[in-house]
Amino acid sequence: MERPDFTQFSGNIVLWGAGKIGSVVAHVLKQKGITALAFVDINERKQDTVYCGLPIISPESFLKNYSNAHLIITTVGRDDVVEWLKTNHFSRYYDAWSLLLEFDFGDYSEQNQMYMVRMIDRYFRTILRCYKINPKYVAERLKSIITSKCSLRCKECIMAMPFLKSSRHISCDEVILDIKTVLDAIGHFDDLELLGGEPFLHPELDKIIAGLHNESRVNTICIATNGTLLPTPESIEAMKRDSRILIRVSNYGSISQKCAELEELLNKNSISCEIKNFKNWYKRPLFGKTDENDVALTKKFMACMNGCGPLIWDGKIFLCACPWVFIETAQPIEANDSFLDLRNADISSSELKQSIYDYINRTNTGKFITACRYCSGSPNSDFANEIPAAKQFKE
């Protein structure tokens, strides 16, 4: 893979993608004394504004005014950008990966640094896929929904929590059993994330954390919370005993009324914490039969799978939230491969392990699931769907 010397292009560089990765690349270039001219972005609301000290222009303006520049692609939507560039006969483009191998956040302030490290990890996975290089693991991330009960009622909840048939907790024993079953098949995950609903509502959260304490096949155990609640003293004690625990807080401003108190509590107990300030979300995908062909479905599936990670719920494993929502909201679809049964007693242990491995590996091979035919796809690819974060239903 090419590692260009970007210093030779200083003063004639344009970045494509005025987003999270773009902010880090701009920071790295500045640290290296390399001058960039502008960002390109397809989001019309970003155009004619300034990001990281650089003007944001449209793709059309880029071709018209910067046709002799060297372009660094700084978005995980890399394939679409390359396709557009080739269609418009532009060939001086590069990926940003070599700039992200080593860098110092220093005075970087655009995003939470711990959060950005995670985003950069996902970026590298995208690059590996684009260059058809097998990733180190079948999947780096595993998510486990431990409860569908939540302290908020968000209209655009990506997990559709306010619309579920019923809300319930998954028992500690079942959570641990399902996680270990997947680990037996896959071997290792960098990131295990405990999700809800709101995980702090789970009455056995401390026992779940304790049950994972000796599980060495995960590097980080993350708990995702919305900043409306504080963990119990028992949960705090369990977190303190495991240095791998990381609390990921989604801060929705005034709605997350316990956010500051939570951060103080975690810091006081030396528990790692990552806070992401959310101003905007994207509308949930639309559900309904699509007329897309297999090529379009594969492309949509791979875009959705980027950095997503398989999802466990009550003895089932899903490749994304879409079929989980279908089932939990009782929507009729023809999707026999919408999930895999982790507690299937009709097959041997070795057969179950192979089935789990093959199922999760579909995220690398592009073998889309039937549920893709009923989903409009990742809402993050359409900036027109941007909405205020965590807007609530009125009681």
Image: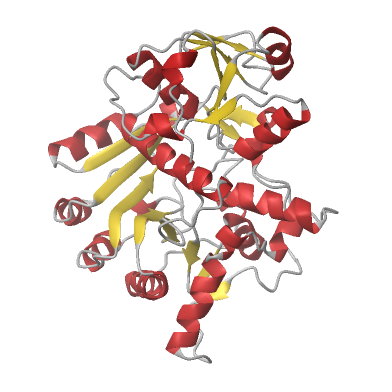
Residue at 46%, 11% in the rendered image? 10
Q: Is residue 373 left or right of residue 115?
A: right
Q: Nearer the viewer, residue 176 or 228?
A: 176
Residue 13 % position (x, y): 53, 15
Q: How is the image coloured?
A: secondary structure
Which residue, as the protein is rendered here, is positioned at the far right?
291
Instruction: Please state the total of marks drawn on the protein image.
Output: 0
Q: Residue 357 location, x and y as percent? A: 49, 72
Q: Nearer the viewer, residue 272 or 251?
A: 272
Foreground pick, 374 / 28: 28
Give the x, y percent position of residue 213. Answer: 21, 64
Along the line of sight, the residue nearer the viewer: 238 or 41: 41
**Image quadrant where residue 318 sits:** bottom right
Estimate the x, y position of residue 386 in percent, counting from the top left: 63, 29
Q: Quadrant of the C terminus?
A: top right
Asked if residue 164 can be seen in this view, the reply is yes
The residue that appears at 18% across and 55% down in the rendered structure is 242
Q: Is residue 148 above or below residue 300?
A: below
Quarter of the image for residue 105 reads top left
**In this rendering, would 77 be left or right of 213?**
right
Q: Is residue 343 visible?
A: no
Question: Residue at 38% across / 74% down in the picture?
Answer: 174
When the figure is inspected, residue 86 is found, relative to residue 151, above or below; the finding is: above
Residue visible at 49% across and 61% down in the picture: 311
Tell me: 283 left or right of 26. right
